[in-house]
Image (cartoon, helix red, strand yellow):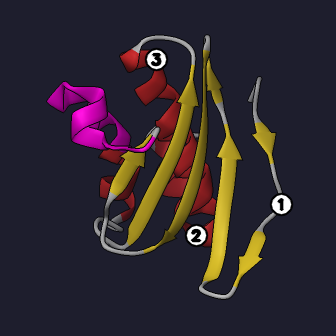
Amino acid sequence: MDGLLLQAFLRRRSGWRFKQHPQSKNAIAKVWMTKGTGKITINGKPASEYLKRAILEVIINQPFGKTETENKFDINCSVLGGGLSGQAGAIKPAISIALQLLNPDLRDALKKAGFL
């Protein structure tokens, strides 16, 4: 995948964290995933406040729906460039890659859905 930069696992006291940097056209997303309750923060704001359109929230939550991992992880995103839809498009593969690194068995479902 062009523009994909993978960084190694970061070990913390609370468990594994995954950091990903996929790019979508001009948008670059960095995603940190930790175990939690499904809270998604983008550039320091809740996803609903930052994205402003419900369809964009649906887009970034698609990987969780395909892998049946809704409300199991908290996501903290830093995203730059592009418009809101481009940013949502960059966040989705970043979340997908982090899920795949967490559980390699999820790769088939994510790949089949076109998220990787």
Bounds of the magenta span? 44-60
Foreground tag (1 vs 2):
1
**Residue at the right extreme of this rendering:** 8
User: The disc labelled 1 sits on which kind of residue?
Assistant: Ala
Q: Is the magenta stretch mostly helix, strand or loop?
A: helix
Q: Is mark 1 on a helix, strand or loop?
A: loop
User: Tag on residue 8?
Assistant: 1
User: The disc labelled 3 sits on which kind of residue?
Assistant: Gly
Residue 24: quarter of image = top right
**Residue at the bottom extreme of this rendering:** 13
Query: For this view, does 83 lie left or right of residue 33?
Result: left
- Alpha carbon distance from label 1 to label 2: 19 Å
Give the percent coordinates (x, y) of residue 56: 28, 29
Give the percent coordinates (x, y) of residue 98: 60, 57
Residue 8 visible in the picture: yes
Residue bearing the label numbered 2 = 105
For the N terminus, the quadrant is top right
Query: For this view, does 16 lie left or right of residue 109?
Result: right
Residue bearing the label numbered 3 = 86
Give the percent coordinates (x, y) of residue 29: 59, 34
Crowd around label 1: few <14 · some 14–19 · many ≥20 (10 Å): few
Rendered residue at 20%/28% (across/down):
55
Q: What element carries label 3?
A: helix
User: The disc labelled 2 sits on which kind of residue?
Assistant: Asp
Circle nearer the N terminus (1, 3): 1
Crowd around label 2: few <14 · some 14–19 · many ≥20 (10 Å): few
Circle nearer the N terminus (1, 2): 1
> Is 60 rendered above or below residue 87?
below
Rendered residue at 66%/62% (across/down):
18
Query: For this view, does 79 lie left or right of residue 6?
Result: left
Mark 1 touching mark 3, by CB under 8 A? no
